[in-house]
Image: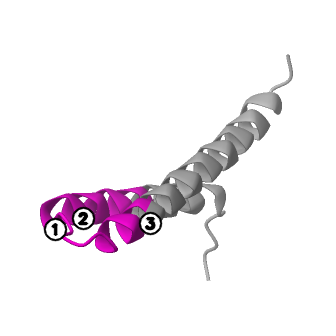
Amino acid sequence: MNDDEPSANSDQAIKVQIQHLRQDHQDLDAAILALAATPVPDMLLIARLKRKKLQIRDQITLLEDRLTPDIIA
C-alpha cells in the first residue's frame, strides 16, 4: 500500500458522501413541495423536513470545507 492512497481514498469518500447528501437534500425538497401542495398541509411535518434539510446542508458545507485546502493569506 502507498502512503498516498488513504488521502486520495478519503477525498473520494468525502466526494461520494457529498453526492449522497445532495441527493437526500433534493429528495427532502421534493417531499416538502409535495406536502405543501396538499389541500391541508401538515405544517409540523414540513417544519421537521425543513430542519432536516438544513442539517444536511450544514453537513455538506462541512465536508466541502474538508476538501478545500487551507490557504494562509
Nearest to viewer (mark 1 / mark 3): 1
Q: Marks 2 and 1: CB-CB under 8 Å? A: yes
Residue under label 3, please give it. 29
Residue nearest the observer in this picture, 15 or 67: 15
Q: Which mark is residue 43?
A: 1
Residue nearest the observer in this picture, 72 or 46: 46
Question: Going by the image, does 63 lie left or right of 68?
Answer: left
Q: Which mark is residue 20?
A: none
Q: In the rendered structure, which disc, 1 or 3, sits on the residue that comes first in sequence?
A: 3
Residue 66 counted in the magenta span: no
Q: Marks 3 and 2: CB-CB under 8 Å? A: no
User: Which stretch did the figure color magenta?
Assistant: 31-56
Q: Characterize the magenta stretch by its predominant secondary structure.
A: helix
Under mark 2, the amino acid is: Ile
**Residue placed at 40% from the left, 62% from the top?**
58
Q: Quadrant of residue 8?
A: top right
- SS class of the residue under badge 2? helix
Q: Quadrant of residue 46?
A: bottom left
In the rendered image, the residue lying farthest to the left is: 44
Under mark 1, the amino acid is: Met
Question: Going by the image, does 70 lie left or right of 46?
Answer: right
Q: Quadrant of the N terminus?
A: top right
Q: In the rendered structure, which disc, 3 or 2, sits on the residue that comes first in sequence?
A: 3
